[in-house]
Amino acid sequence: MSLPPVFYHHFQTPVPYTRTLALQEKIYQIQLASRRTSSHHDILLLLQHRPVYTAGRRQTESELRMERSRLTKTGADFVMASRGGQLTYHGPGQLVGYPLLDLGRTSPPIGIREYICKMQKMIQSYLSSAHKLAHVPSEHTGVFLDPATKVASIGVQVRHRLTTHGFALNVTQEPLEWFDQVVACGLTDVKAGCIALAAGEQIQVHDVIEGVVDAFRQSYGRDVEKLELESVGELGKVILELEEEAVGAGDWPRIPIY
């Protein structure tokens, strides 16, 4: 039996991280409830966040108390997340992808390790085909341009074979100064890179959407279609509400405040 398409939505304005967490949870609950009748949709959310530092589930609030205090003074938010991985940064100039998929649609179901591997290969394929950027193998999860330069991060959560969280790909130079404020993902000998610097291109996040969607299609072997918000009921309503909230939030700090 052929699989249904994955529907994607691209947010035009950087969105607050906590509200996106709530949106993912809402979609997860919708998927979980409607899976019994196979009426649920697989979704790919593509977006930029307003400046935010996030910690993974292996870290505790108590051990990060001082970091939270220091980093929020830069003008960014700070959020404890339920994904894998450690402290990192998300913000404008970085494409974040949240695939909200049912890994149980296939027989046998896709395992978590295979799912992450497909995600990593998807990013690598996009960088190679669109920007002639080669990756180097690494013992760490993510995509590296050389042993000391990481251009993309991956951190996922899987519950009842339904996925949340996903990947982050640095497109412009804007995120780099924010990354300099932390040891991202606990890798002391690694710095953040971006497509713009590595490829010597003038590029913005909206320029990469089409290519990333195509790479996702090829990596996961799924048709990918644009989500028509008016046709998906409650799901479309909550996405539109977040779009409006993002616009109403106004501008954001472009560089860290010192």
Image (spheres, rainbow, N blue to C red):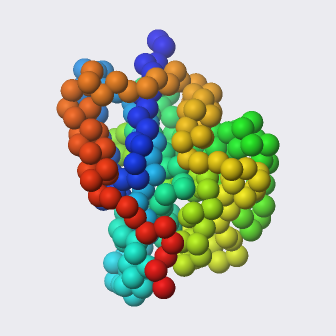
Instruction: Locate residue 193 relative to residue 24 in the image: left or right.
Output: right
In this rendered view, identify the residue nearer to me: 98 or 70.
70
Provide residue 185's location: percent of width, then percent of height: 56, 68
- Which residue occupies 32% across, 58% down? 250
Q: Position of residue 224 (x, y in %)?
A: 50, 25
- Where is residue 203 shown, x and y percent of the image? 64, 48
Which residue is drawn at the image coordinates 34% and 24% (left, top)? 228
Q: Tag count in the figure?
A: 0
Q: Residue at x 46, y 52 (%)?
A: 48
Image position of 178 with respect to 27: above or below: below
Is residue 197 positioned above or below 214 on the image? below
Q: Nearer the viewer, residue 138 or 91?
A: 91
| Residue 117 at least partly seen | no
Residue at 41% of width from left, 53% of height from top? 14
- Residue 116 lies, in percent from the top left, at 56, 45
Above or below — where is 71 with respect to 47? Answer: below
Residue at the top extreme?
1
Quarter of the rendering containing residue 83: bottom left
In this rendering, does residue 182 appear at all? yes
Displayed quadrant of residue 126: top right
Q: Is residue 173 left or right of residue 253?
A: right
Q: Is residue 179 above or below residue 67?
A: above
